[in-house]
Image (cartoon, coloured by chain):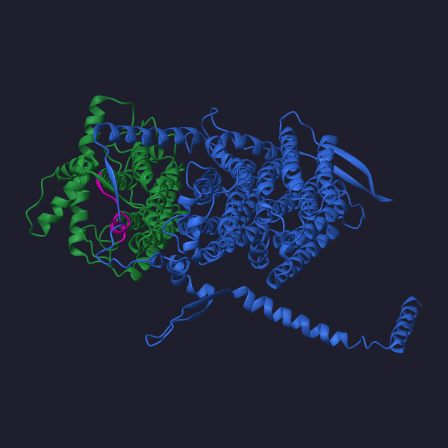
Chain colours: A green, B blue
Amino acid sequence: MAPLFAGWVEQCRALLQNRSAPPLWQPYRMLRKLFHKEATLANHASWLFRGAPYVVFAAMVLAAAITPSLTTELPAARVADAIALVGLFATTRVFMALAAMDIGTAFGTLGARREMMIGFLTEPALLMVLFNGSLMAGTTALPAIVQDTLAQSHVTLHPSLAFAALAFVMVLLAENARLPIDNPSTHLELTMIHEAMVLEYSARHLALIEWASWLKLFNYACIGFALFAPWGIATHGVSLGGTALAMLALVAKLAVAGAALAYFETTSAKLRLFRAPEFLTMAFLLAVLGLLVHLLLKA
Amino acid sequence: MTAVLALVGAWLLVGALGLLRPTGIGWVARVLFPMGALVGLGVAAIGAVALTPAFVAQQVVLPLGLPDLPFHVRLDALSGCFLLLLGTAGAGISIFSAGYFRAGEGTAPGLLCLQYHVFIASMAMVVLADDAYLFMVAWETMALSSYFLVTTQHRLPEIRRAGFLYLLMAHIGALGILLCFGVLHGGSWQMTFDAMRASPLTPFWTSAAFVLALVGFGAKAGMVPLHVWLPEAHPAAPSPVSAMMSGLMLKIAIYGLLRVSLDLLPPGPWWWGLLMLAMGVGTTLYGVVFAAVQTDMKRLLAYSSIENIGLILAGIGLVLIFRTFDLRVLAALALAAVLLHAFNHALFKSLLFLATGSVMHATGERSLGKLGGLIRRMPWVAAFALIGSLAIAGLPPLNGFVSEWLLLQTFLQTPRIPLAFLNMIVPLGAAVVVLAAALAGYVMVKFFGVIFLGQHRESSLATARDASWLERIGLAWLALGCVAIGAFPQAALDVAGRVTQALVGTMAQRGPSLWWMAPVASNQASYSGLWYWAGLLTVTAVTFILVRGFFRARSRRTAPWDCGYPWQTPRMQDSAEGFGQPIRHLFGPIFKIEREVPQPTDRAPSYRIQIEDRFWVTCYRPLGRLIQGVTERIAVLQGGQLSVYLLYSFLTLIFLLVCVL
């Protein structure tokens, strides 16, 4: 499902940029190609370098199992709440950075440093956004937050959630190596962050990492839906009809979100790296502001 | 009770036995330090016994001390908890020390053994003391023995300087504590803690006692701005001693703070908690930002200790706030987070300090700029250090995450405080704590990445050797603790519950079953370390097997991609300065930076950067100069002539007579 979403975003981008679009399942083809290739490892790569893709992938799968994308009755959701979810993203980031430093080329460490710089600003912002939602519902368990929002009979516009949503979008862009911070389609040394870190990976390792990063985008989108647009998620019991309906709703929401993301990326330009902290600090401050608005106005 | 005293005595005995053969390294290393470790396990076991539900606090009066002032000793849940900490982490450090100390380095091994065991025994006595007198005696023994340990390499002038600074700050702290006890006895001149609990004090004097305790114990714990000794003393000491000081001694200061503020003092006004919270939050951010720009690995860890102490202090602040408003369950939750974080920090910080010790022995380098790529030469140390780094970065499913999770859960409960002002302020604290936790991840990637990953920055590193098996056992013991608490957080929460029961009268909920931790309410927040581990490991393993099974898993080794520039050297990797650059850039105003950048025309380009603590420049140096000036004036009085001194005595006598009449 996640590669499909990535394919959709690529397709929208291509359409908006007047290119002929790749097919929707292009990411799957790429995965197949990568898995069949022979892996090359740098001469002094250690066990950490070889193990990191598996850990990163596993962390993202676990995150997908925790996020309520279709239903709130998830067996795995009780294992970890929203804070632990952020912990999973942090684990991914740290392992990626360590693996990039393992080879000891200038690029790897450069990417790791930039990624960690972005990371230490996005992580608190994301947590603050989640705190907004959890203070609203009085719980840090994501399914319970969804249920709480759905249980409200009428749609109210919370100013604090508006702040949080804005902050969340900024975090999403930064964390997933999207345009104003990083460019997903460049290999130009000066600008890249994520690509610099995975430069040394090839074949099956690269496949796992690419898959994990698509999953990450997908997870972020689902967290966003759970916090700000939970309509359609099945709440009571696991019935076939409810799940199918939730599936439809999810596909529709993803289609809209993907198109919006592609539109945003096409119309905006990349920020200078030194400007990135300002962008992210703003996200953090917006999220804190949302929290304060909530506590002050109880709204 | 007698058992624990016997064990403390055994520590002293082990130390004294070291004097039998002061230079015999084999005797000290192979026999005495392992014995010390066993005693440590015994102490931990007694601490655990004191934490069982059936245990009743025991009190003993020792036939020691001054004629009318015997030593009182007491074992209750709080001291049991800290004995457990002391014994568990102490055992790991002792085993490591057995393999670490070598002959011919500074102080003779036998003497070192004595100082080491006196240090650890005095920490146990601080925890057990039940009157101010014994407390201060043990406290000072702790400070002095650790001073001698810090100055093991006393031939180096900078180490003597660090030791002096440490001793000075220790005594300023001790002065605060002494004054605090002076206030607490409330004019009754009864020095036992029982009398202090009962002494009636006006609100002004309780607040005075609280502030004095905060200053006194804060100086020992490394609270900003009393932290200056920490980044000097920790790198100066041998690594096991740094581990003891950072992992254990700072916790003893936390114990003192908890004992005074929660046990001896009645619930105070809300600004106590707010003050503590503000100090804690400031300390956290300050520590972690400075840790990010350090280039010496032990200084980096020392600043990281300051950060963790800040987290603990912030937690205590929350306890005090909740206690003021009589929100007992929340106070218990916050206290559990504090105790757990203290325990966790003892484990992973000792682990990391010991790992730096192994690295120093293998390479002789402390500077991050000269290390690198050690994961291939020292796989064991690297693996254990990785566990420690991930734990301290607060990543699930290790133990650091558990205590940070609890702390954040506590922060989320603040809307229940019935004071609007606090409602506004406290979430800001949460924001800073979260920021600091994320920065800790940055710091640890830098620490681990620069030391163990990449290519060797010096050619001499290619011959580095892994730690000896005794050292590995010590590291493994501490790493095991990190993993175990991460997997069974609810058990740790249970244990902390006994202490909270004793101190704030209730305990945080433990969750519906053994597998889940849900301290607030089971539908509100839950976390299961064990299932988390299981999930992560299963998915990793399944992915690995699937990928290996379905695709031909061939791989081949080549040179790394060099972008068509084949003249890359290991020096082109990010150095420690380079990795800290974004932080220096972002938090520039906090530091005092001196920088020399080479000109393009320089024949021999050199780059130098020096980062100083602003507190050192703005507070301590002028203060030091002032004191120097005043003492020089006073020194005029001491002319050295006998007749002048006689005149002084005579005038004093006249003055006293006038006063009396």
At 36% from the left and 57% from the top, the residue drawn is B574
Please say whether residue B409 is visible from this viewpoint. Answer: yes
Residue B61: image x %, image y %?
Answer: 80, 36
Residue A225, picture quadrant: top left
> Is residue B472 on the magenta stretch?
no
- Looking at the image, residue B360 sits to the left or right of residue B98; the answer is left
Residue B616: image x %, image y %?
Answer: 56, 65
For residue B47, above or below residue A128: above
Residue A189, picture quadrant: bottom left
Q: Which residues are magenta?
A: A193-203
- Looking at the image, residue B67 sits to the left or right of residue B145; the answer is right
> Is residue A202 on the magenta stretch?
yes
For residue B458, above or below residue B659: above
For residue A81, above or below residue B411: above
At 50% from the left and 55% from the top, the residue drawn is B366
- Looking at the image, residue B72 sits to the left or right of residue A206; the answer is right
Q: How many marks?
A: 0
Q: Nearer the viewer, residue B96 or B255?
A: B96
In which quadrant is the C terminus of chain B drawn?
Answer: bottom right
In which quadrant is the N terminus of chain B drawn?
Answer: top right
Residue B72: image x %, image y %?
Answer: 77, 39
Residue A142: image x %, image y %?
Answer: 34, 35
Please say whether residue B207 is visible from this viewpoint. Answer: no
Residue B40, picture quadrant: top right
